[in-house]
Image (spheres, rainbow, N blue to C red):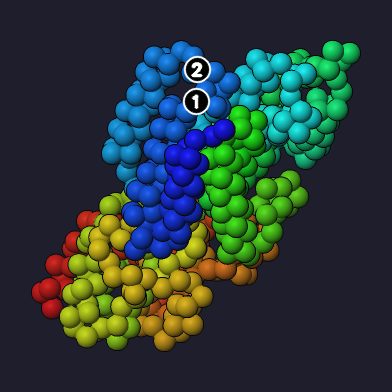
Amino acid sequence: MTPTWVRLAELGASVLFILALKGLSSPKTARRGNLLGAAGATIATIVAFFYGEKFYGGPIQHLPLIIVATAIGSVIGWIAAKRVQMTQMPQMVALFNGVGGGAAAVVSTIEFLSAGNPAQTRAALAATVFTVLVGSVSFTGSILTFMKLQELMTSRPVVIPAGRYITSLVGLLTIGSAIVLVTWLDSAGNASSSILFVLLGLSLIMGLLLVLPVGGADVPIVISLLNAFTGLSVAASGYVLGNVLLIVAGTLVGASGTLLTRMMAQAMGRPLTNTLFGAFTAKATTAAGPAEDRPVKSASPEDVAIMLAYARKVIIVPGYGLAVAQAQNTIRELVELLQAKGISVDYAIHPVAGRMPGHMNVLLAEANVPYEQLKEMDEINPEFAETDVALVVGANDVVNPAARNDPSAPIYGMPILNVDQAQQVVFLKRSMRPGFAGIENEVLFDPRTSLLFGDAKESLTKVVSAVKNL
């Protein structure tokens, strides 16, 4: 019989996991949510160590190796978390997520090979197969997502010849091998280990095929989807191992990841199937002429300072460029200067600004920007028509009217921030290079738009000095 302290510890850890997810739903409580989740994971690990005989049918074997591996992993995680830049956080999330899915697949594979299939129920065998399949897809898909975000490969959709047919064939073979593995047993009641390895290989390939045709603008949705996959694979592995906490934690991650994926797909204005497979049916388009052949209106920091200082209402639109330049504190200083002059200033936050959900919220929270100044897209969009200056700092795709006007654009249908409705628009950009989706933004060539070229932090610092001198 399971001791009472173990049940209480499992209940406490489960409650901490739930509270952690609740805390992560708001920038105000996100730090506390992270700490609660870490506390729950610590409790779960302690229970596994001190009551491992229940989970593994006997004393834990190779304990020194487990402790060494845990220590090495902890050190790597600590160093990575301390050194990672905010701009690299999405890559880190994708990488860690892939490791989680891969670990679940490896554990279930080892359990399959070592537990003895006749001793397994058909349900346990099905859970093992599910974990191997979904965990492997999550692993290779997340690694490829990491490579796209890190720009180790092109962020544009990669469509291989006959890609839709190859993906469909591999998908059918993967599902078919999973069904055969669960339903076909030999005379001794064993499932085939050879078919398991075939399933493992097909699943790894399937993860690559799912992510290759996804364009850069849709990568945040794929991160969320693969996160849900990892959660489901962890929950299934918990069933295989008889570990209640793995089931609870995996189910929570799977459910929250699924909901987040659905919300992000809605924010992008198209179904998830279009995100994953839209590149297969997209029509070839003729690229616009080189940006340097089209006139744009440049501005100096002093010009921008005058526009801002004599405005009544200003909306700041932060994007990935703000994170790259680490200019969040400088933009907050500028906003405080403008507010001291009686100017109304708000931040417009697009659901997929940056490289992952909440990226801009966390970035601005680091600079102690008041939460009430951060307005979501649906709340702020009606205000652009009454705005004197929209200041776009490092954003591009989330303000690109092609999402409304160009059916051939990869971001078509995505709701955007309506900066083109403001009286004046100022873009802070390093160059005329297109955004992550790889398409031109017509707002840049609008007569009402001024461009201030350079590093966002340096440019904002000059604007702040110019505002102070007015």
Residue 314 located left or right of residue 173 = left
- The residue wearing badge 2 is 59
Residue found 27% across the figure and 78% down from its top = 307
Q: Nearer the viewer, residue 225 or 416?
A: 225
Is the Cβ of the residue at disc 1 closer than 8 Å to that at disc 2?
yes
Q: Image quadrant of residue 161?
A: top right
Could you say whether the residue bearing mark 1 is in a helix, strand or loop?
A: helix
- Quarter assignment of residue 46: top left
Give the amino acid type for the residue marked by disc 1 in the picture. Answer: Gly
| First in sequence: mark 1 vs mark 2 | 1
338 left or right of 447? Answer: left
Label 1, label 2: how many angstroms apart (C-alpha)?
7 Å
The residue beneath circle 1 is 52
Q: Residue at x 49, y 18 (%)?
A: 60
Badge 2 density bin: few <14, some 14–19, many ≥20, Cα 10 Å: some
Whether residue 124 is visible, yes or no, is yes
For residue 161, above or below residue 469: above
